């Protein structure tokens, strides 16, 4: 019983910090998606993503790679398939994120990269299913850094997987990320998380 109370107390004590986590609204040509970011789990990655948001880098880019049953990726190309210039790449934080409980599960947002583990810049992807093979250590000793989760609009992301896809995993009709902006965290989401955390603690 003491363990259950302690677990619940720990979960609830983190609520305030959780509620203060930054949220970003991705306004796409198919609807809006809101993601909540977790700087405690991936501080460099979250800061990097927010810098791109604040600089309007994502506005007018597309989701250029969509693989049904896997993920949808965007943040790097214009509708003319021209790659946008980026800032320097960042350190891979997949290990820290996983230690904090963030893995490549359905609805999470993670950084895309090349075969080099520390090559992530602006591109990101949203997982359509649990892709645990992308977690640290992955297949290359590093994995892919998860830094947030979709809290609203996952149906919009799912809808992207229903469009006509050309060879190369590119949608036949561009799915445009019209704008990305930070939004105020909603108390209702925090309350929902509070109830969920307490429920999970009591179930242990």
Image (cartoon, rainbow, N blue to C red):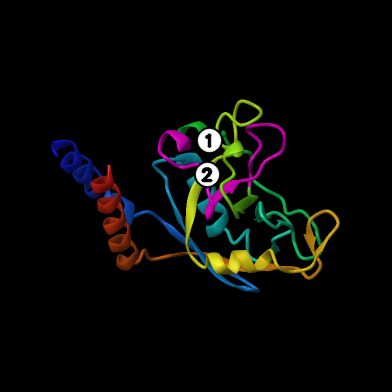
**Dot 1 crowding, Cα within 10 Å, few <14, some 14–19, many 20+:** many
Instruction: Quadrant for residue 60, please give it.
Output: bottom right
Residue nearer the viewer, 107 or 43: 107
Report the residue that reaches farthest toward the left: 2
**Which secondary structure lies at badge 2?**
strand
Q: Tell me the residue that label 1 is attached to.
A: 94
User: Does residue 67 sit above or below 8 in this rendering?
Assistant: below
User: Does residue 98 sit above or below 73 in this rendering?
Assistant: above
Q: Are marks 2 and 1 in contact (CB under 8 Å)?
A: yes
Q: Residue at x 50, y 42 (%)?
A: 103
Residue 167 screen position, x and y as percent: 86, 56
Q: Is residue 87 left or right of residue 169?
A: left
Q: Is residue 177 visible?
A: no
Disc 2/disc 1 C-alpha distance (Å): 6 Å
Residue 8 screen position, x and y as percent: 21, 46
**Which secondary structure lies at badge 1?**
helix
Residue 58 screen position, x and y as percent: 63, 60
Q: Which residues are magenta?
A: 97-121
Which mark identifies residue 146? 2
């Amino acid at each position: 019983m003491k363990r259950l109370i302690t677990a619940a107390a720990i979960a609830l004590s983190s609520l305030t910090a959780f509620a203060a986590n930054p949220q970003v609204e991705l306004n796409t040509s198919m609807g809006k998606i809101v993601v909540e970011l977790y700087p405690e789990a991936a501080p460099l990655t979250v800061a990097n993503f927010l810098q791109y948001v604040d600089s309007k880098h994502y506005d007018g880019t597309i989701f250029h790679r969509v693989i049904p049953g896997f993920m949808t990726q965007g943040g790097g190309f214009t509708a003319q398939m021209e790659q946008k210039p980026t800032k320097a790449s960042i350190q891979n934080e997949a290990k820290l994120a996983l230690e904090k409980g963030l893995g490549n599960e359905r609805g999470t947002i993670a950084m895309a990269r090349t075969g080099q583990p520390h090559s992530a810049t602006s591109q990101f992807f949203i997982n359509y299913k649990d892709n645990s093979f992308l977690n640290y250590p992955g297949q290359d000793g590093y994995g892919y850094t998860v830094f947030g989760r979709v809290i609203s609009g996952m149906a919009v992301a799912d809808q992207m997987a229903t469009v006509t896809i050309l060879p190369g995993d590119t949608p036949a009709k561009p799915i445009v990320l019209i704008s990305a902006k930070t939004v105020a965290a909603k108390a209702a989401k925090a309350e929902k998380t509070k109830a969920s955390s307490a429920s999970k603690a009591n179930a242990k």
